[in-house]
Amino acid sequence: MSKLGIGILFLVGLLESHVSASNCTSSSVTVHWLGDQPSYHAGVTFGLPWPQGKYQPGKTRFTIAGNSEDRQQLQSWATGYWADGSLKWTGHAIAESNSTHDNYTVTATSGCTIRSASSGKSGTKNSSIIVTDRSDVVRVNTGEIAVSFPKEGNILVSAIKTKSGKTFDSRSNSSIQYSNFHSIIDEVSVNQSSSRTLVTVRGNHEVTDGPDHDPWLRFVIRFYLYANSAFVKVMHSIVFDGESDKDFITGLGIRFDVPLEGEEYYDRHGITGLRRDPGEEVRTAQYEGRKLANTSSWDSRVTNRLKWIPTWTDYSLTQLTADGCSLKKRTKPGQSWIIIPSGTRAEGLAYLGGATKGGLALGLRDFWKRSPSGFDISNAASNTGEVTLWLYSPAADPLDLRPFHDGLNEDGYEDQLDALEITYEDYEPNFNTPYGIARTSEIYLFAFDETPTSDRLASLSTYINNPPVLVPESKCIQETQALGGYWSLPESVSDAASTLEDRLDFIFEYYRTQIEQRRWYGFLDYGDFMHTYDTDRHTWRYDVGGYAWDNSELSPDLFFWLYFLRTGHEDAYRVAEALTRHTGEVDVYHIGDWKGLGTRHGVQHWGDSSKQARISQPQYRKYFFYLSGGDERIGELLEELLDTDKTYGTLDPSRKVRTDGWTPSPNSTVAFSLGTDWSSLAAGWLIEWERRGPRWEEARTKLTNTVSGIANLTNGFVTGSGLYDPVTWTLGPPPADPDNLGNVSVSHLSAVFGLPEVVSEAIAYFADDIPEGFREAWLDYCYYYHATAAEQKARYGVSFGSQSLYQAHSRLAAYAAHEIHNTTLALRAWKDFYASDGLAQDAAWNTTHVNGSAVLVSVDEAAWLATNDAAQYGLAVIENLAYISDSLDDYQS
């Protein structure tokens, strides 16, 4: 590519809207900080819901004001649309401001003539970002820093320059096995705007020295820059595309060069603790990171001997576990490391700079939770120092992704199915591969013209671990129905409802506590839960087949997001966010033949041979996507899942139990479940249609065709499966019933991986355009799942036989009762909830404290509770209260 070319300059400033007509429509939404009001924010992105039909894209302007009527710059964009084309969700960004309010009011104005004028209200800065997009580099100037992103080579950021001219640059390093790798840029793109600019860099890692190796560990790194801010947020995503038995990651990091030329050594360190005292003023200035007074004012017994004071050039902090970090330093390579008194949990922020030259602070969110992590500072006594953030520390054992057992001589499907009966692990050779899993890390950069105070750096440590988030009130989201109508605000109008609310709180608090007590942390593990408890060992079954990591089994993702939507609790948001970041990345394949499928629960997140769409369910990512203002990484994951239907041409999810002889081939028809398979595909199609993504018309057609196909099945959802054509995007009767006479196949798992939530949203979204018969088919399934055997036989010719998860399915009956106004069915739903399987009304609903020799550390256990039960019980409570709370007292009486 030629290095020459005409640069394109974008100057984007905020235009504040003013109404010049009186017949307009406007309404306001209040957003507040998640948790306590921050003392500082460096720019924030957030999402807002809107009722159907009220605001049109291109004809609506948005403004924002603090609670003191302080107008601020607001950048706005659409992230979701209702079927009629009106705005459903919008994303917004505000720049760094001189003032922070406890809440903000966003006003949408539509239906009138709107003129624009430059903003200039009190409390705001002149907010604009200058973006220069040339053939060889993208430059972004926020007003506080100017950042350069080369479009070729191995330097991700060629320069970060402060207003005073302080410059830093970066590299991405990966040290793998016996070869060293660096990043190679394939593509750089920029999305410029007034308040926020996003620069996206894609590439691979290539060998710099050592044995030859193909490029690997493909990456996408997103840099977010806000107007008026010297801060950069970085989302760093990698995909593992190596061979697990040969490729071991020993270190993965990002390195920045920091200029220190002209900084006296005594302005860096070494003046405190000496035998001779330079003076209290000098010692205090050094401790506070300020330039020292002229040496002529010092005690001459110090100034005459400065040359004898060792200079410390290298520092290292290593967080190998969630509970311990170690620190050390040395004077130069080849000399001994000196141990610095160590700690437990480092906050994950390092600063390198000088008293007169300023410097760079670099931080990793959830630093100790994602151990092994670390920092290295090198050449601090030279003209150019280096600070390296290790996302995976080279001081740890290599990241070993090999299978945890050798197959145990399981020979063929018969052995594998038999082994499933004892360890609950669905093993198959070559299926326990990590090829295609991913991980995203959240990094923060802060550039300074002068060294900040220790208090300032401590506040930034808090900032990166709990970044400020703006959210609308739960009532606002609920009233718009923009995230479904299957949840309501907490209900405490009766003793029975209050008890249910208390139990939801218990479940959330128990799992929040278990994360800490059980140390569910680690580079790949953080964000997930365990599946089942071992009452004998007083631990979760971390080492037993399918009982270990949960991998979204039975939808805990849904429960925790709905719990947040109802309560607005900060802790709930943080837990659900971490869960979304993990399950959407580590538990799902992003490349290869199984792209779009997730892995069933197990000892290793990728170890089980059951690869299914039920785990990669896009519905689990939907809530965070919209609430965050359209997080680009989550959006990318949602786009990847649009091709999940193609994987059925490579992999048959039912291969071990199939009896009809069908084998997969590309573009061939496939019989898949109308529950766990179709619901996941349908969720992805519906979200793409909502987002009006690049393939939304294709997605709408696939969703409409398959919805029509289900409606045309004689027994609707009770049919159990359908024959899907990936070429025509149609769905017909299954191979077992080619003439559509009325197959009956009902599974207890069909509706516990997002099906009720996806179907109810689809019905509401289609509204009057819903294909005829689909709503009725779903209502039938909801009614008959736990109807009497006589009712089932009268309707379908046969009964469904023995089923389970009736408590979980009570929310289906509740939905049907609400839709058809059937109080008798509502009472049956409450009976299913209270008097069937699942968590019993008289369960312990408390924890037992265990300490002493029985455990490594003191823990609280609820031995009666498993994640399957917790998730489905929680969803049943939430949805039953949303649909049939008015029947609860009648049932109780």
Image (cartoon, rainbow, N blue to C red):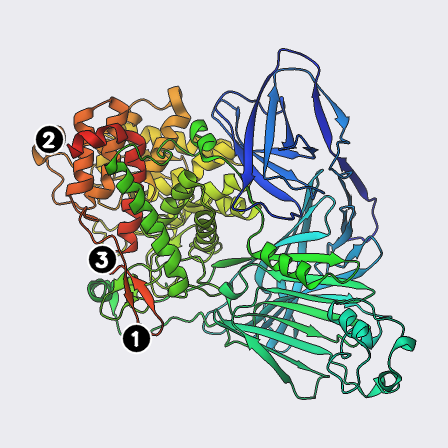
In depth, the one of 543 and 798 nearer the eye is: 543
Judge whether 823 appears above or below 144 on screen.
Answer: above
Query: Are dots 3 and 2 in contact, CB under 8 Å?
Result: no
Q: With 247 as the anchor, is 57 left or right in this view?
A: right
Is any part of residue 417 visible from this angle?
A: yes
Per the model, the C-alpha gap separating discs 2 and 1 is: 55 Å
Element type at marker 1? helix
Q: With 797 as the anchor, is 532 left or right in this view?
A: right
Residue that badge 3 annotates: 864
In depth, the one of 198 and 882 nearer the eye is: 882
Per the model, the C-alpha gap separating discs 3 and 2 is: 34 Å
Per the model, the C-alpha gap separating discs 1 and 3 is: 21 Å
Of callouts 2 and 1, which one flags the residue occurring earlier in the amino acid sequence?
A: 2
* Residue beneath the point at 18% across and 41% down: 834
Residue type, numbered disc 1: Gly
Judge whether 242 appears above or below 398 on screen.
Answer: above
Element type at marker 3? loop
Neighbours of disc 2 within 10 Å: few (<14), some (14-19), many (20+): some
Residue that badge 2 annotates: 791
Q: Position of residue 785 (x, y in %)?
A: 19, 37
Q: Position of residue 498 (x, y in %)?
A: 29, 39
In depth, the one of 383 and 568 nearer the eye is: 568
Residue that badge 1 annotates: 852
Residue at the extreme front: 280
